[in-house]
Amino acid sequence: MHTAVNGEAAQERKAPGRPRNAQADEAILDAVLEMLSSGQSVAAISIEAVAAKAGVGKATIYRRWPNKEALIIDAVAAMKGPLPEPAGVSVRDDLVMLVKANRSGRAKRFGKATVCLLPEFLRDEQLGQMHQAIVEPRRDVMRGVLRRGIENGELRPDLDIELTLLMIQSPSMMQNMLNWNPNVPEEGFAEALIDGILRGARAV
């Protein structure tokens, strides 16, 4: 699979011309996510099928995205939504907010799309790298909260930030996508997860 998502491609999608239609954009991206959520592979999805499902013409899609892969990556980015902004009051409150932000709205609605895409990310290195480029800024937000906690004495100075990130994000992701352990209640999940991790991460 050859992809063409780079600065030039992004510029092409935003080039002057016919104004973007936010409603059409959302319909197109939702159509992609619904198709992925139903179990269709990237290879099985066509621009023609997306256009038909979204109720737009193929030209409408091609004016916005240079190829199918760029469209799929933008759909994943749209599913995740804008980067959350921590309030900066306490590490606990900020981490709870970040976990909740990944378990609500479109991310919750289209959680199965990520499940269906995971084999694609493993099979296609370039597509996987593009997905990492979407995820990494979100990791950076959480890294910033953890670093702040170390600096202000809320968290232990020897805390392994990357391992702590993994411990926070992995259970949330598995529950969100697969309801991995149905015995864990949805209500209060973010608070319980963060409180459990902070028991070992707080400064003594």
Image: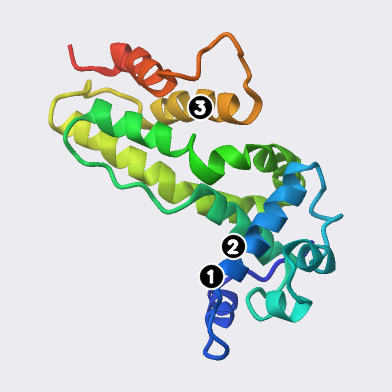
User: Mark 3 or mark 2, which is nearer to you?
Assistant: 2
Q: What residue is shown at x 71% (from left), y 56% (from top)?
A: 32
Pointer 1 and pointer 3: residues touching (CB < 8 Å)? no
Q: Quadrant of the C terminus?
A: top left
| Residue, far right | 44
Q: Which residue is mark 1?
A: 22
Identify the element where label 3 is drawn: helix
Please say if 33 is above or below 197: below
Whether residue 126 is visible, yes or no, is no
Q: Quadrant of residue 3?
A: bottom right
Q: Amino acid at mark 1?
A: Ala
Q: Between marks 2 and 1, how big is the CA–CA gap?
A: 6 Å
Q: Which residue is mark 3?
A: 172
Whether residue 95 is visible, yes or no, is yes
Left or right: 22, with 95 as reference point? right
Q: Quadrant of the N terminus?
A: bottom right
Q: Which residue is mark 2?
A: 26
Q: What residue is shown at x 65% (from left), y 26% (from top)?
A: 178
Identify the element where label 2 is drawn: helix
Image x and y of residue 107, in percent:
55, 42
Q: Between marks 3 and 2, how big is the CA–CA gap?
A: 26 Å
- Mark identifier at residue 67: none
Image x and y of residue 76, in percent:
60, 52
Which mark sits nearer the N-terminus, 3 or 2? 2
Q: Between marks 1 and 3, how big is the CA–CA gap?
A: 30 Å
Image x and y of residue 115, in percent:
69, 37
